[in-house]
Amino acid sequence: MIVPKPVKHEPRPGSFVLDGRTSLTADPALGEVAAWLRAELAPVAGGELLPGEGSGTITLALDGGLPPEGYRLTAGPERTEIVAGDPAGAFYGAQTFRQLLPAAAFRRAAGGPFTVPGVYVEDAPRFGWRGCILDVARHFLTKREVLRFVDLMALHKLNVLHLHLTDDQGWRVEIRRHPRLTEVGAWRKESQAGWNGPMDGRPHGGYYTQDDLREIVAYAARRHITVVPEIDLPGHTQAAIAAYPELGNLGTPLEVRTGWGVGEHVLNVADSTLTFFQGVLEEVLELFPSPYVSVGGDECRKDQWRASPAAQRRIAELGLRDEEELQSWFIRQFGAYLAARGRRLVGWDEILEGGLAPGAVVASWRGEYGAVAAARRGHDVINCSNTSLYLDYRQGTGEEEPVPFGTVLTLEDVYAFEPIPAGLRGDPAAGHVLGAQCGVWTELIDSSRGVDYMAFPRLSAFAETVWSPPERDLEGFRTRLAEHLHRLDAIGVEYRRADGPLPWQTRPGVPGRPEEPERWQAKIDAWTSNVRSL
Ligand code: TNX
């Protein structure tokens, strides 16, 4: 019972035994995958899985005829063979092998021998972009917690970690040339309890050094996960402005934001501000080899630009129509900067509102209109639809859901998600849908334990929507999931039970912001009216 469900999974006669005498032999090109699998299995098997012929042998081999990230796995007496088109495919075959073992094999303690039933699996992903957004800006997650999350993504065959590194409430990436970004911007004096609740009076913060980020990137790369950094511009920048007031429109000191919601403080559009953030990106590009780099572009309130003589002068000089076009111009500067360095800009769907940067990839979050509009105009898109994939939204109607936020988004709702938006089905532009991303936004999630509760098992359902063939089978998924939850238990993931939170997973008295579906739809309609009129 494998999650996400493979393309083909058939029983074969006999079984394979993993124990202290099992050996592992790999094509030299798959040496890294072999090293990873050895490290995962050694404490379980109670042996080193050295190369050569043991009492049973696992082999990793290449076959260039297989699709990207695809693999075939055959397990039987004395032999398990994983054949892959590339190292990523071998890695996914190895992940599947781990899931063929009993759930107890996910404990890092020798409990073997373990038996794998004879099996033939043939598999390859439906989409090349299988992502998750992790917001480490609103609430910081330690490096160790991020690495654990990377392992959980890899278990689910996800391959993009979109790391939301900066926001009004915190700047989390060390930038050597602008040290105050973390000295000042990584800390806030307190946080709002829940949505519009009282201030908690407790300082919060943290950041990743450049060495930490190199480590996260390398750790993820070894698990075939690309880390896409997000430096959110020109809105969501209060932490940066608190560190360097000259980046803002008021020139007066500000604090790192302590409350939630969309802030009014945004960057000014001076040349010096563009230069400042190009400098930031220069260091970010050194840390993150990802071909894609996000500059956010979402929820930029225009009040300060409307009131700013300098912003208005910029609009006039450039012959722009309004502040929307000013935002597009701003984002385009970074599109050009990134393109000149061989990278592609990713931005939220707001970047559609005043004209798209050439080559930009649109991450569509306000429903799917943005994805449809951008794909029709020839841009690649990532479906991040909030109404299907925002894992910070409440998982049930119950009052006891911890800090209930957004509309109800159940496990079943996520499982029903289809990455190709309805508006693109049957349209050749659907080819521009690179894949999809679920989102773990953390205004109301203040710990790694809280991330476990909100992300799992909905992330397991999401993984099937981007990896597995398009047909849905809810009953089959429930059966697979029942077994998968034993794996998550063995790993120590504090997922949400089907019947709701355990008592210590509730947060009584912390105010949430539940939304009713009708109000929500009205909001999405309003959000997307700009996009639809394009
Ligand atoms: C909208 S997604 C945001 C985030 C919030 C999230 C909460 C996006 C581009 N902007 O800043 O964290 O909603 O659900």
Image (spheres, rainbow, N blue to C red):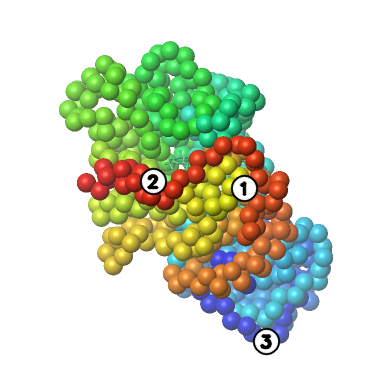
Q: Count the marks: how many? A: 3
The foreground one among 167 and 390 is: 390
Contact flag, marks 3 and 1 (Cβ < 8 Å)? no
Identity of the amino acid at label 1?
Answer: Glu
Query: How far separated are the C-alphas under marks 1 and 2?
Result: 22 Å
Q: Secondary structure at mark 2?
A: helix
Q: Earlier in the sequence, mark 2 or mark 3?
A: 3
Image spot of residue 1 (x, y percent): 62, 72
Q: The residue under label 3 is which amino acid type?
A: Pro
Q: Quadrant of residue 47?
A: bottom right
Q: Secondary structure at mark 3?
A: strand
Residue at label 3?
A: 13
Residue 519 badge = 2
Which quadrant would residue 280 be assigned to in this image?
Answer: top left
Residue identifier under label 1: 400
Q: Residues within 10 Å of mark 1 (few under 14, many from 20)?
A: some
